[in-house]
Each structure stands twice: as structure tokens, then as C-alpha cells.
Amino acid sequence: MPMDGVMLGFVARELDAKLKDGRVDRVIQPERDEIHLLIRAQGVNHRLVLSASANAARIHLSEHAKTGPMEPPMFCMLLRKYLGSGRVQAVRRIGGDRILEIDVSALSELGDPVTRTIVIEIMGRHSNIILRSDSGRIIDAARHIGEDISRVRQVLPGLPYSYPPSQGKLNPETASAAEIAVRLAQTGGKLDKAIGACIAGFSPQAAREACARIGLDTIALISEIDVEAAADALHRYLAAMPAMGPCVLCLTEDGTPSDVYPFAQSHLPLERVQAYPAGPSAALDAYFYERDRRDRMNQRASSLAHTLKNHIERCEKKIAIQNEALAGAARMEEYRQKGELIQANLYRLKKGEPVARVENFYAEDYAPIDIQMDVSLSPAQNAQRYFKLYQKARGARTLAAEQKAKAEQELDYLEQMEDDLRKCTDAQGLSELRAMLEKSGHVRKVATKMKPRKEAPSQPMKFLSSDGIEIEVGKNALQNERLTMGAKGDELWLHAQKMPGSHVLVHSVSVPETTLMEAAMLAAYYSKGVRSAQVPIDATLRRHIKKPGGTPAGFVIYTHQRTLYITPDESAVKQIKCIRE
């Protein structure tokens, strides 16, 4: 239940307490549907995130900065104009539902004090961020909604702002026990469904928790319970809810956030949870940061994955065609021999014979051989015809061999890129991967007049072995090259044998057996052979590694290697302490 009305109520109270009288220093729009407000309040710098994303609409304080575009969008410029240096007056939730308003006091163009309101509507794909004037009219919005989209409610600059159509639900902050009882009786059906239909902002998850808190079963029918007693218990629960806490974050086995709640849920067996007593924003920030990073990475990576798949299939088809050409060229010696046999017997062959039967002096027993002849050509011309077929087959073999070698080299490169994409965990690594594919011509370069911002190079993964020795693992070809070429001569280097994979470097002159096996396990797991029963891993010292000139990033040759055979095991990799992903 990341951002239903219950969670939004906790966030609204936190923001009102922390941001009141705060000054809006900066406005950034890193995404089309996301705004960051940098607010200085009570001696602390805060970053307020407002998102109208269809899958992740939210509002909370964040510790994670995002870089805005070189040219700010129009909505961002407008917010800077109307909110810059303004003071936050109040933060409130509307009607207990998923609408939150922030009043900001600033100066008008004439220098008069005015109050403008930021309205964030968290409603799935209908979510929006709207700036409203003190007269109640819309100044602008992140999403414009005209009559072609909705005839009921338009959101356009200059129009009067109106709240989304009411569903007639009760405000959990003001509803009395009697009102709740009447509404529950009118709604009927199962208790959790009835609570969700009666109380504004209650998601199915919040309704089930309410049932557990008042001591009733979620599937209990309204007609079978004491409605007034249930309404009275629910009223007390709603009144006590604002003081509940702390906010908790649910984690999967690998530590990834899976859900977030404003307080511990009594109806769920939450085994892996992390409490955030500082406030709901900290928990929401941790949850959405990981989710947003993963979703945007998957979205950007899926395009590259599709492109790589198409190029790999093209290379495989090209190699198959060249193999067929090489198989056809295998008859070139037959053509040459037939031409020479005809030429050696010109004195006894006549024009118009469909078959020339001659002694085959290439065979040990000189057995006769039949050679097909073109009756329209003379014997000498038939010999020349076979010599031309020989020359054509020989040329095809040379060209096919060259083309096959090029296609195989390209296929190796693309498979390395595909393996690198699987290991990519951050935007920097993804940008580096795309830049390499643009340079090789496999991805079209995006035309832009803006000079790209120079970013710091991405960092390889870093682990700490059981012996306390650092092990670094490259996630792409550029990281592999920087890692290997920058290593000391006595450091141990590992790589999967004859397959795409990560360069693994052990930062120690003396490597214990336990550390060696853990490094080999990392090399096997972060290679193309991750699904194999056994992966051969070569280990050698950095001084025995060379990079041939003109080869792509990450390509090296090495000697003096020792080969280990490792069965990749994800659970064994997770047991190795990860310092940096």
C-alpha cells in the first residue's frame, strides 16, 4: 500500500511539521512527470519529490538527487517563476482522500504577497501535479486534460480548478461513529469491502488491516455482525491511527524492498521488515528509489536487449550463409581436375559429345571417369568452363572465410555486450554500454544539439572475501579494461575461459585458497556460463596479461594461467559480502 489515503495522511502530517515556513530555493524537473522542490526549513535542506507517474505517483522527502535536463521544461520554468523564494504555509490532505495541497506564499509581479497552491492528485494513471492561483484558477499542470480526454473535468491553464468527482465516501478524520454505522449498514456485503467503500482513501490493504485492528474477520458479513459496535471500534481506530507507527518497509530474501506500510500490519506475517522511526518519507524514499531505479533500468535496458538480440540473430544467419558458401566451394578441386582432364584429352574428344569418358590420372588405378559436357561448346571451351567454375569457387571460399571470421568476431562482441547488459545495475553503466554500441554502429546515435553532460565513469562491483581481501568484478567491457589495465602486476586476475564474462581482480599479492575459490565463483556467476553445470575459470597474474592493439574494450590475451572448474551457485555468491554493487 505505498500511497493510499492512509499513507498520504501520515506524509501530510510529516511534511506540515517539517516544511512549515520553509523557503523554496530551487525547482527541478528531472522527469516529465516528476518535480523536485529544494526547501530550506528549520535549518535543514529538504528535497521534496512530487511524482505523477502512472505506476509510482507519490509525494515524500528524499535523500536521492536527480539531475535535471540542460534546458528545463516549460512547467519547471513556470514553477520557478511562481514559487521561487516562496514560503511554505501549510500542507494538508483533502477529505481524507489521495489529494494533497501545499500552500506557498510568494510575491506577485507587482510585489504584492499572494498564496499559490501546489495540488498533487495521486490517482493512478490520472495522477497530476497542478499549480493553482489564490483565485482558484489553474496556472498550469504537468498533464493537460482537455474535452477530448474528459468531458467531466478539464485541467487546463486559466480554467477554475475543481476537485475530482466525489465518490461520496466518509472523511476518516471527521466521520462520527453513527455516520460510519449508517453507511456500513447501507453498503452491506463483506466487512473489508464495506469499509473500503465507505471510508475515503482506504485501499483494500488498509481495509483488511482495519478489520484486524477492530477484532473482526475480513469476510464477516455486515448482516451477521453488530454494526454499531463495529462502527464504534472503527471510529476509535481512525482516531488513534495518526499516532501509530513507526513506518515499516518489507524486504525480500535478497534485501530488496517489496512493500511499505505506515505502521506494522497486524494481519500480515511480516518476517523481514525494517522500521523507519524518522517518518514515512524515509521508508517511501527507500521503497520508491529502488523500485524507480529498477523500473527505469528495465525500461531502458529492454530496448538495448531487443537491439542486441536482433543483431545476434543477424550474425548467426550470416555465419550460416557463409558456411553454406564454404561447403559449396569444397567442389573447387573437382572443377580444376575435370578441366585438366578435358584439356589433357582434347586430341580425342569431339564437339557435341554429352559425356567425356577419360582416364582419371588423379586416381591411383587410373579408373575411367565420366565428365558432363556442354554440347554447344568445344572440348577446349568446356575445359575453360570448368576452370572458371574453379576460380569462382576459390574466390567464394576466400570471401566466405573472411566474412565468416568478421561475423564471428562481431558475434563475440555482441554476446559480450549482452552479458554486460545482464550485469548492468546503474544508469552510468547502461550509458557506457549504449555509448559502446553507438560507437560500433549497432545502435543509432540520438541526434541532439545539446552538449552531453560528462559523467563520472561507472564503478565495478566490490566484494570482501571471507579472508577480508577485496575482490572487484567488472560489469561491462569498459569497466573490465579499466580494472585490468589499472591493476598491479602481482594481483590475481580471473576470467571465464573462452566465453563472455567479467574480469575479476583480487587485490592481494598473497591469495588464500578460500579467497581464490570465492573469486572463481564470482567469475563463473558473472559470465555467460552462469547456467552451466561447470565453468572453466582461468586465473593468472596481471603481469601475464596483454591487450593487442586495435582490439575492442575488454579484450585481452594471457599466459601462465591455472584453470579451475566451478559450478555457479547464486546462494554462494550472496554469502560473499558485497561492498559496492
Image (cartoon, rainbow, N blue to C red):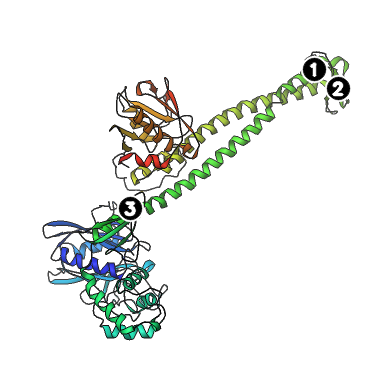
Foreground residue, 549 or 195? Answer: 195
Task: State which tag comes first along the sequence, 1 or 3.
Answer: 3
Q: Which residue type does callout 1 highlight?
A: Leu
Dots 1, 3 in contact, CB < 8 A: no
Real-space Cα separation, disc 2 to disc 1, in angstroms: 10 Å
Residue lying at 53% horizontally and 31% vertically, measured from the top left: 406
Q: What type is the residue that disc 2 sits on?
A: Ala
- Report crowding for label 1: few under 14, some 14 to 19, many 20 or more residues within 10 A (C-alpha): many
Residue 356 is tagged as 2
Depth check, front residue: 335 or 56? 56
Foreground label between 1 and 3: 3
Q: Residue 2: which quarter of the image?
A: bottom left
**What residue does disc 1 label?**
341
Q: Which of marks 3 and 2 is nearer the N terminus?
A: 3
Task: Report if the CB atoms under discs 2 and 1 are less than 8 Å apart.
Answer: yes
- Quarter of the image with the N terminus in it: bottom left
Looking at the rendered structure, which numbered label has been put on residue 211?
none
Q: Is residue 372 left or right of residue 22?
A: right
Q: In this view, does 293 lie above or below 392?
A: below
Residue 369: x %, y % from top left: 84, 20
Q: x and y percent of residue 71 in the render?
A: 29, 54
Above or below, 330 relative to 303: above
Dividing the picture into quadrants, the one containing residue 388 is top right
Q: Tell me which amino acid carries mark 3.
A: Glu
Label whose residue precedes the other's in the sequence (2 or 1): 1
Label 2: how many residues lie within 10 Å, few (<14), some (14-19) or many (20+)? some
Residue of label 3:
290
- For the residues marked 1 and 3, what is the alpha-carbon distance in whole angstroms? 76 Å
